[in-house]
């Protein structure tokens, strides 16, 4: 299995997961033109994407999904609540239900419920069917639940949100209401909350850690990198970038 990102952050997210003959796309917050440009360097024809999985309706994840799926006839999978919030009434999709695994080609997908200020937010764990490696993606989550700790333990790879530094958010440029939203229990994960998750889950098999959805205003890649390296018990992180995402990482 391998993973790549076309961009990560509040201006747009799109993540590729590939194994065997199967290519999945998690979210697309980019216009069709931007998405197509950004996809070029990965040498994938958009028409060969087997499925798009949509986590929730916020524009940085959903903004380009319907147009992309319609243009290239790509099947879309999402929760009913998300579909109602963001898709055109007649748009056909496959329904995802938290806790119910689906198989698309060579990859099994487990949707996991997370607390976030949207209708029916899901994050995902991918399981490659031939040799059992598991990859988790967790962003857009307001706080760490017991359920998340259970679901995201014993992974081989983890893409984890490190959204904001508490002090930088507090002192930063966001209006108070937005500060409360981001920092609230259904907003985003702070560096400390994500570090707490890394301490609570079993990371003994983790050989790839990607820090993602890093705020450009309320955090820096350097702070995140230092915090994770200080922990010692997990691999040095790959830092996902808003503009560049990250290149293929083999798991
Ligand atoms: Zn987001
Ligand atoms: Zn969101």
Image: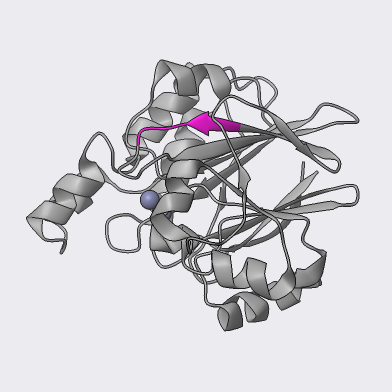
Q: Main secondary structure of the magenta part?
A: strand
Does residue 212 appear anywhere in the picture?
A: yes
Residue 186 lies, with reference to residue 68, above or below; the image says: above
Q: Quadrant of the C terminus?
A: top right
Q: Is residue 190 left or right of residue 101?
A: left
Residue at x-position 35% and y-position 32%: 193
Q: Is residue 112 magenta?
A: yes
Quarter for ligand 1?
bottom left
Q: Depth check: give the residue in front, 167 or 49.
A: 49
Q: Which residues are magenta?
A: 111-115
Does residue 139 appear anywhere in the picture?
A: no
Residue 174 lies, with reference to residue 71, above or below; the image says: above
- Residue farthest toward the left in the current orientation of the protein: 176
Q: Quadrant of the N terminus?
A: top right
Q: Is residue 61 left or right of residue 223?
A: right
**Could you say where residue 81 lies in the image, as x and y percent from the top left?**
43, 43
**Could you say where residue 54 lies in the image, as x and y percent from the top left?**
55, 51
Residue at x-position 56% and y-position 56%: 27
**Could you say where residue 164 lies in the image, as x and y percent from the top left?**
31, 48
Q: Depth check: give the residue in front, 164 or 125.
A: 125
Splitting the image into 4 quarters, where does residue 237 fall? top right
Q: Depth check: give the residue in front, 45 or 9.
A: 45
Count the labels in the image. Answer: 0
Splitting the image into 4 quarters, where does residue 227 fall? top left
Residue at x-position 90% and y-position 51%: 21
Q: Is residue 154 left or right of residue 60?
A: right
Colour setup of the view: one colour
Q: Depth check: give the residue in front, 222 or 23.
A: 23
Residue 36 lies, with reference to residue 20, above or below; the image says: below
- Residue farthest toward the front in the current orientation of the protein: 90
């Amino acid at each position: 299995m391998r993973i790549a990102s076309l961009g990560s952050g509040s201006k747009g997210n799109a993540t590729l997961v590939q194994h065997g003959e199967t290519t999945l796309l998690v979210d697309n917050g980019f216009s069709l033109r931007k998405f197509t440009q950004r996809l070029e360097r990965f040498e994938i024809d958009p028409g060969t994407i087997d499925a798009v999985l949509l986590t929730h309706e916020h524009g940085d994840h959903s903004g380009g999904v319907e147009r992309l799926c319609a243009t290239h006839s790509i099947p879309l999978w999402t929760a009913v609540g998300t579909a109602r919030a963001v898709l055109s009434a007649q748009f056909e999709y496959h329904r995802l239900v938290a806790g119910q695994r689906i198989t698309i080609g060579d990859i099994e997908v487990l949707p996991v419920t997370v607390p976030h200020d949207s209708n029916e937010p899901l994050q995902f764990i991918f399981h490659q069917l031939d040799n059992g490696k598991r990859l988790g993606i967790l962003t857009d989550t307001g706080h760490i639940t017991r359920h998340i700790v259970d679901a995201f333990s014993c992974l081989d790879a983890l893409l984890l949100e490190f959204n904001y530094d508490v002090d930088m958010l507090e002192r930063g440029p966001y209006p108070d209401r937005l500060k409360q939203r981001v920092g609230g229990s259904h907003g985003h994960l702070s560096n400390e909350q994500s570090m707490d998750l890394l301490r609570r889950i079993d990371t003994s098999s983790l050989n790839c850690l990607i820090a993602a959805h890093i705020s450009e205003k309320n955090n820096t890649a350097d702070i995140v990198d230092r915090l994770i390296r200080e922990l010692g018990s997990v691999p040095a992180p790959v830092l996902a970038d808003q503009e560049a995402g990250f290149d293929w990482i083999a798991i």
